[in-house]
Every structure is written in C-alpha cells, then in structure tokens.
Amino acid sequence: MKTALRNALIVASLFVTTASGGLLAGRALADTSPARQPAALQADGLFWETFHSGDYAKIQASLEASTAAYLRNPNDAVTAAHVGWLHMWRLSEHNRLDQTPASITDDAVLARKYFQKAVDLAPDDARFRGFLASAILAEAQIDRDAALRDQGAAIMQQAVKDWPAFNLFTAGYVASNQPADSDSFKRALDQQWQNLEVCAHTTLDRHGGNLDQLSNVMFKASTGSRDARACLNSSIAPHNEEGFLLNMGDMLTKSGDWQTAQKVYALAKRSPDYASWPYRDVLERRIHDAQANVAALNAAPTPGQKPTTPMMLSSSYSCMACHQH
Ligand code: HEC
C-alpha cells in the first residue's frame, strides 16, 4: 500500500509540475507527505486522552482539534479516521444525553465522509472499511434507504473478508438492533460465534456446550499475530474481551437463549483485566436478570424515552465498554 500511495504521489506531483510549475508541485508534495504534521500529532494527543477517559463531554473540543488538523492536511488518513471516530462515538453513545437532538443523526453523514476519505487514503486498513460500512448502514437506517443499505452491506462484506477477527464483530454488532427473528439478526449472532472461533481456532457449539474448553484456549491461540489486536485486550481496547462478551450475551438473551447468554457473559469474568473493568456491574446484573431481559431487550422503543435496559449497541457505553481505561 505504502508503495502504491507513494507512486501515486509521484505521478500526481509530476503531473502538477508539468501543468502548473514548481511552486504548486512543492505545495502538493508537502500536503500529501506521509509525515504527520505537528497539528495532527497534537490533535492525536487530545483524541486519545478524550477517548480513553470516556470524556463524552469533550468530544466537541477534540473534534475541533482533529478537524482543524484535517483542514491543514486532508491527506492524512489517521487524522481523517479520528474525525470519523469522534462522530461515530457521539452518535453511538447519545444515550448519555438527557435529550438527544434530532440533528445528532448528522454525525452519521459526517462519519461516512471522513471514513470514506480514510479508506481512499489507506485502503489496506480493514478497520477504516468496517467503520465506513457502519456509518453507511447507520445513514441508510436513518433515511430508510434500501439502496444505501445494500451499498453498506457490500462494503461490510469486503471488510469482513479483509480482517475477519475484527470485522465479524463489527458486522454483527451494528445489526444487533434488528428484530430477533429477522435473518439479519440471526446472521449477526452467528458472526459473533464465528468471531470467537476465528480467535480461538476452534469450533463451537451454538448453545455453549463446549465453552469451558474455549475458556482454556480463549484468546491465547492468537497471541503475537495480527488477530491478537482484534481478539485480546490491548492498550487501544483495554477491555475488548469483556465488551465483546457483553454484547454477545445481549444478543443471545435477545434471541431468547438466556441460558447460553449467562454462560457467555460469565466468560468475561475470566479476562485478566476484569477486576479493573468499569462495566462489571452491568455484566453482573445482566447475568442475574437474563431471563427477564429476554422481554426487555426485545421491547419496542418508546419515542422520546430511554430504554431502562438497552442492548449494548444502544447504550451509553457502546464504545466505552471496550475502550475506556
Ligand atoms: C468489542 C469491543 C469494541 C467495541 C464495542 C468498539 N471497539 Fe473500537 N476497537 C476495538 C478493537 C479490538 C480495536 C483494534 C485495535 C487495534 O487495531 O490494535 C479497535 C480500534 C478502534 C480505534 C482505532 C485506534 C487506532 O488508531 O489504532 C478507534 C478510534 C475505535 N476503535 C473507536 C471505537 C468507537 C468510536 C466505537 C463505538 C462506536 C468502538 N470503537 C467500539 C474494540 C472495540
């Protein structure tokens, strides 16, 4: 990819040189330089501080810094992706707000714009493609636009192919708000099983019959590989395992199989970082209330009212369950 990008830049700068002379060519080179600019590095700092502390109220300030860095250099894929992620986070955890403004849906449009840019600049980053697909699917849901939904689904399919251990989760997670008896929900739940299978290099019984065996090898098989970043806890996603299992338990509960849900939730307690996870109480309540939550997680939303027990996807911790330090 880097070579391809560099070649493209060389071609572009040659073209500009021929067409408009040296000055413009010089500027084009500076703008597209792979070296990150100081403003971008500074914006990165604020991004990580805001994100890892779960400081939702600071999203706007962080967006200002990252967007300003983007305006200085719109060819920096990391900066473009950070702007996209901040919009996604604000949209995704809007349940934190007392009142959600209608215009929060604009975050989906903007997330799509910036992830499209990030994908164009760094087509090899499967995470950017997965988030681009998520933003498109969110927008399609907002607009009830079937053609856009198909477009998002096709990009998601490619993202899953590019990096199954990361994007099987993504694909299934964003479909977890579909009705439990729909094909898309059933596929989404199976994608969570497949994700565990990819991470643990094993085959799993869909009712948790061999989960005990999983917990012994769980997430160990992939240590040191690219998949380790998607399967294990890391500094970027310090509670990835716990968050993954919380969502999967929610999806199983919603499907009606609360007994298997309890087993899957309980696996999170085996994470080496469970004791420092800020959402332990949520998980333990979910295990306790699993049977009653079958109805709660299937309840139709009341407009203008927050659900008392939302699916992880619609909760105030839909990103922070994995990412909060
Ligand atoms: C199930 C856990 C989980 C959930 C939920 C989750 N993520 Fe992630 N996220 C990860 C993992 C794992 C990575 C990959 C880390 C890597 O590439 O090393 C990641 C990567 C990222 C990165 C990339 C950081 C970088 O530059 O390397 C950002 C930013 C991010 N996620 C934002 C979000 C946002 C915003 C949400 C909510 C809409 C979210 N995530 C939901 C697990 C999760």
Image (cartoon, rainbow, N blue to C red):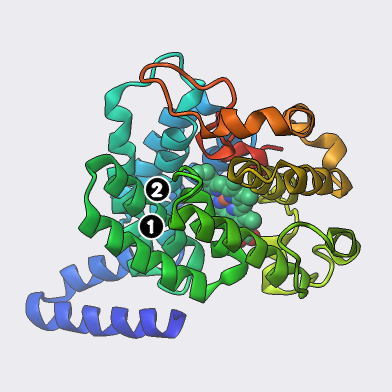
Report the disc number at residue 36.
none
Relative to the observer, which residue lies in front, 182 or 39? 182
Residue 93 in the image, given as x and y percentages of width and height:
49, 32
Q: Secondary structure at mark 1?
A: helix
- Please give the name of the residue rendered at 65% of the width and 41% of the height, measured from the top-left corner: 253
186 or 1, nearer to the observer: 186
Res. 84 mark? 2
Most extreme residue toward the left is 19
168 with respect to 302 (left or right): right
Q: Position of residue 252 (x, y in %)?
A: 65, 47
On the image, numbered disc 1 is attached to which residue?
132
**Vertical side of 130 occupied by 309: above or below:** above
Q: Quadrant of the N terminus?
A: bottom left
Which is nearer the eye, 47 or 71?
47
Q: Say which label, 1 or 2, has the lower sequence index.
A: 2
Q: Is residue 52 above or below residue 169?
A: above
What amino acid is at disc 1? Answer: Leu
In this orientation, does residue 208 appear?
Answer: yes
Q: Residue at x 84, y 41 (%)?
A: 274
Whether ligand 1 has any atom under 8 Å from the Cβ at mark 2 is answered as no
> Which mark lies nearer to you, 1 or 2?
1
Do tag 1 and tag 2 residues touch (Cβ < 8 Å)?
Answer: yes
Residue 210 rendering spot, x and y as whole percentages: 84, 63
The relative height of residue 122 versus residue 182 in the rendered view (above or below) is below
